[in-house]
Image (tube, rainbow, N blue to C red):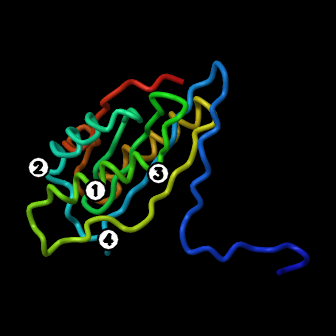
Amino acid sequence: MNNGVEFDDRKHPAHPSPVIRVNRPTIVFLTLCVEGRRPLLANDHVHSCLMVFWAEATHWLVGRYMIMPDHIHLFCAPSNEDSSLKLWVQYWRNAFTKAWPHPQDKPIWQRDYWDRQIRRGESYSEKWAYVEQNPVRAGLVNMVQEWPYQGELNVLRW
């Protein structure tokens, strides 16, 4: 308690259910990190596997995504109103982990992830403009177009 205001001491992010609005898209921005921030993800095999698991996990649609060595950013949207983001993330992370060829690397994922619902079209564009510069800021490439571990599976229109 501080000045009559109570602060939440949780150590994990809250995961509020996305707000479904009539005539407005529901787009959520996710960030998922590798346990211990180990650089396991930025390779062709991981990229291919994630594409398969995201395509199979049809309760949410993956839009734009960026796979970095130790984390992933992606935008997603529910395919129907009853889709649980938490269960969807759990499904494809578990499938990915089971398919991981190096048992000594497990666990792959940090227990939790960060999610934020996009509220405006400008926010979607601004967030993507920031995310797509990650490989450049990290010194992995000189230009965004050189980074092979990014893409868009479904067009999520605002």
CB under 8 Å between discs 1 and 4: no
Instruction: Please identify, in this view, whether the residue under mark 2 or under mark 3 is nearer the observer.
Output: 3
CB under 8 Å between discs 4 and 3: no
**Extreme residue in the bottom direction:** 1
Q: Is residue 122 left or right of residue 94?
A: right
Hey, what amino acid is under mark 4? Glu
Residue assigned mark 2: 45
Q: Nearer the viewer, residue 133 or 110?
A: 110
Mark 1 or 3, nearer chain start: 3
**Extreme residue in the top direction:** 23
Hey, what amino acid is under mark 1? Asn
Residue assigned mark 4: 35
Look at the image and tell me whether residue 63 can be seen: no
Q: Give neighbour class at mark 1: few <14, some 14-19, many 20+ (Cα, 10 Å).
A: some
Of the numbered discs in the image, which one, if any, rests on residue 86? 3
- Per the image, label 1 sits on a secondary structure element best described as helix
Residue assigned mark 1: 94
Which residue is found at the position 61% from the left and 73% from the top? 10
Q: Is residue 43 left or right of residue 149?
A: left
Q: Nearer the viewer, residue 19 or 36?
A: 19
Instruction: Report x, y in % for residue 102.
Output: 10, 67
Instruction: Report x, y in % for residue 30.
Output: 45, 49
Instruction: Report x, y in % for residue 87.
Output: 43, 49
- Per the image, label 3 sits on a secondary structure element best described as helix
CB under 8 Å between discs 2 and 1: no
Q: Quadrant of residue 64?
A: top left
Q: Give neighbour class at mark 2: few <14, some 14-19, many 20+ (Cα, 10 Å).
A: few
Mark 4 → mark 3, Cα distance in angstroms: 18 Å
Mark 4 or 3, nearer chain start: 4
Residue 66 higher or lower than 93, as above or below? above
